[in-house]
Image (tube, rainbow, N blue to C red):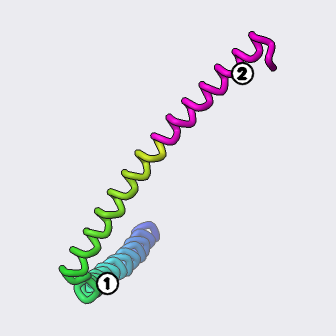
Amino acid sequence: MDFLQDSRWTMQGLNSRLKGFLEQVNKLQEDNRRLEDQIADWGLRNAPHAQESTQQERTVEELHFQVGKLLMENAELALQSDHMKSKASTIQARSVVFGTH
């Protein structure tokens, strides 16, 4: 009889813990739904207006164009620099060969 009694107490304890766990899960799900609603409301209140978005998109496009232009200029300057270094190296090599160094 003691074994059956212990088993019942064990099962009651487990059932009680399970019930508490499920109640906590339900509470967390409700809290989560409420937070999701609050986030959605905040997003609607703080969304940029269409006109602001269009202006921001234009600004981004303009900046993107400027960055591309600057990258091209930088590449051209790098090529010019390499060309000048090559010329300087050639002149230096000639001056060593002809003994004008």
Q: Say which residue label 2 marks.
A: 92
The residue to which callout 1 is attached is: 35
Q: Which residue is most to the left?
A: 50
In the image, the segment drawn in magenta is: 76-101
User: Quick one: 40 or 93, which is closer to the camera?
Assistant: 93
Let me know if residue 78 appears in the view.
Answer: yes
Which amino acid lies under the numbered mark 2 shown in the image of this protein? Gln
Q: Is residue 66 magenta?
A: no
Residue drawn at (40%, 76%), measured in percent from left and top? 17
Q: Nearer the viewer, residue 41 or 86?
A: 86
Residue situated in front as seen by the camera: 36 or 59: 59
Q: Is residue 24 left or right of residue 84?
A: left
Above or below for 83 versus 7: above
Q: Is residue 26 visible?
A: no
Is disc 2 surrounded by few (<14), some (14 to 19) or many (20+) residues within 10 Å? some
Quadrant for the N terminus in the image: bottom left
Can you give x and y, in whole percent of width and height, for residue 73 in the image? 44, 47
**Relative to 73, is 18 on the left or the right?**
left
Q: Indicate the secondary structure of the residue bearing disc 1.
A: helix
Of the two numbered discs 1 and 2 on the same chain, state the one appearing first in sequence.
1
The reply to whether callout 1 and callout 2 are in contact (CB within 8 Å) is no
**Label 1: few (<14), some (14–19) or many (≥20) C-alpha neighbours in 10 Å:** few
Amino acid carrying mark 1 in the image: Leu
Write the residue at 29% across / 73% down: 56
Percent of width and height locating residue 46: 29, 86
- Secondary structure of the residue carrying tag 2 is helix
Q: Residue at x 36, y 63 (%)?
A: 63
